[in-house]
Image (tube, helix red, strand yellow):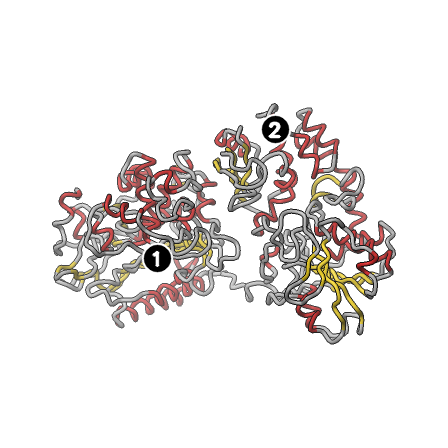
Amino acid sequence: MNRACYKASFLFLAAGLAVGGCKTLSSKPVAPRTVFHPAKLEAIDAAIEHAIAAGKAPGAVVRLESGGAVYQKSYGAKSVEPVLLPMSADTIFDGASLTKVIATTPAIMLLVERGKLRLDDKVNHWILGFEAHGKGAVTVRHLLTHTSGLRPGLSAKPAWSGEAKAIDLAKEERLTAQPGTQFRYSDINFILLGEIVQLASGQLLDEFTSKHIYRRLGMRDTGFLPPFKKRSRVAPTERVDGEILHGIVHDPTARRMDGVAGHAGLFTTAADLSRFAHMMLNGGKLNGRRVFKRETVQLMISVHTPEGMKTKRGLGWDIDSPYSSPRGNHFKVGGYGHTGWTGGSLWIDPSTRTVVILMTSRTHPDGKGNVIALRREIATLTAEALRGFSFGGKAAPSVLNGADVLRQRKGILPKGAKVGLITNHTGHDRHRRSTLDFLRASSEVELTALFSPEHGLYGKLDEKVDDSTDAKSGLKIYSLYGNNRKPTLDQLAGLDALIFDIQDIGCRFYTYISTMGLAMEAAGEAGVKFIVLDRVNPIGGATVAGPVRLGPSQFIAYHNIPVQHGMSAGELARMINAERGLGVELQIVKIEGWKRGLFFDATGQPWTNPSPNMRSLTQAILYPGIGLLETAMSVGRGTDTPFEVIGAPYIDDVKLANRLNALGQTGVRFVPIRFTPDYSVHKDKPCGGVNIIITDRRKLRAVPLGIDIARVLRKMYPKNFPLAKVGRLLCHPPTIESLGQGKTLSQIEALWKADLAKFNTRRSDYLLYE
């Protein structure tokens, strides 16, 4: 259908019914009963039939896939007005907001992959004038994650029409929140993205997606403006101005834009959605044809909303939000999907490789249908139908840090003691209740002094920290990242014990453990007891990697341990006390329920950014390797994703990504990116570099990864890359020398082997957890 004909096509046309079969993508179809429990499939049938009888939708098509098996069935009616027509498996539905993830997001990401645009491009770079009314900071990434601060939709009045007018109206919008601070689902975001696709590609959104995505995937019935010859297969939607919408997009804003928009307008079938879903599960490839690079798919489905934001969104895709009803009650967070206003939904669960598709036209004929509860019920029953599905009991084990144990067990602290507390904003229990407040209210001890580490008591400072007074408690805060790195005897005078409660991240040059070691020295000299409220190592306690420190003790390398030490703070305290002969009276309040192989997200503990630029577990996992590069190049400080991006002004991002991907480093991929940090190394300078995507964190070797990146940069940019600066945090001159000589990674790792073996022997004497 051409656009000129579009506006005249509101009439419902009843025609013959085409019934198509269901074709599985598997070369060897698997009987559904071998993958799904038949009784649960019957329960799914009953749930849909009950919803239809209750007027929630006139009909539906469900398609469930897992383990090579496909269960597809149609129910009820495709149309009830002006004529009654049965639902068929090949019915074409108005996808509504499924457009966002089946059309607009993949189009944007294909252009990103091809280097035509960047996720952190400012919107006004593409849409001139958008910066009006304070919108200049909004980026493409903000649009994709619904964190732009824009309203949900454009106003309908006064009346307007046309794509150009929609963009003009968007330019005049005012932000309701600063970009990156709030999640607010907004069609305006994707209207703008649809325009950016056109500007970056030179093709209209419908033309671009048809040529580069749908034809390549064999999605024959997916597109905007369904042609007249397919009209008989299209499910009608709502009655508007006395006429049933049939083959005309239901969304009124998309109708004003002549049927093609970034937020709505796509029509599709359950079978076509299945093809798209399998492409995503296969890392961008379907039936031998690659549409996206694997790392592009991973980038789409990774969480991109800011750390600490309850809503979790990928690029376009929903992960965990109020819109996640299609996940049901059993599929774990980690899958992704989307819904459409007209009644369609798609959910993809990578852990079980299951696809749940429910297509309805719930707005037909009067707009009163509602399938939100049905979506959840179908997904819940699908998980229950899977043979061997692991329901997993609790979402996470009840791991108790030392701060939790302290609240639950009486008599841990020396009764009547005057105590000082070394802590910051991470010093809280699993309910985020601060240890400082607990000790202030305690009848067992008297809290008389506070000590703060790097970044201060509240974890917000990136420079030298001065002594101050806590406004809440009135207590003096002695800074251990100012004129003194170690408590003085005067500061400890009158104390019976020092309590340490700070979250470390498991890396030698993360300075909180240095603060602990120096404070232990002071406690030993003053005859003060030292108590560690132990905390989990967020990147796990099983991996030990990197060279053991050579040279003298310094604040970024206090003790002779490797870069990634695989120990808790309490275990390190035991090692430091014994190996340095401090003789301090040491008490460890042990963690309960933690196993060494657990990452932080398996503990049930809440995440608090340990420092201003350590904003996620992903960043913590990468830090022992990427942090080594910190003074030699930008590691993303001054961006939204520190330690997930690296770059420098002299780097060709595409060439570097290709070289790094060719290394074969396990558990990680690299996407070319350009960014401009507003802080730290290369501040305000456009940088080429890579976005580092973790594909399997258990296979990732962070420290060797950092060394390998340094090795590649040394070869590619010998005059630009300051290799010597890597040595500052590495503290191992033989490695820097070998990098300068062009040695291989295996040759470099061989330099560490003997000292690592000795460390592991030493370490075993101090471990507290299995």
In the image: residue 503, left or right of residue 109: right
Q: Pointer 1: what residue?
A: 339
Q: Nearer the viewer, residue 202 or 209?
A: 202
The answer to whether the residues at label 2 and label 1 have Cβ atoms under 8 Å apart is: no
Residue at image coords 38%, 53%: 175
Q: Nearer the viewer, residue 72 or 360?
A: 360
Q: Nearer the viewer, residue 654 or 396?
A: 654
Residue at image coords 18%, 48%: 230
How far across and how far down the image is residue 585, in percent?
A: 85, 61
Q: Which element carries disc 2, helix, strand or loop?
A: loop
In the image: residue 351, left or right of residue 570: left
How far across and how far down the image is residue 568, in percent?
A: 71, 55
Image quadrant containing the N terminus: top left
Question: Considering only order in the chain, which callout, 1 or 2, is on the residue closer to the N terminus?
Answer: 1
652 shown above or below 182 = above
How far across and how far down the image is residue 250, in percent?
A: 23, 56
Mark 2 residue crowding within 10 angstroms, few (<14) / some (14–19) / many (20+): some
82 shown above or below 665 = below
Residue farthest toward the bottom in the current orientation of the protein: 443
Kind of residue sitting beneath label 1: Thr
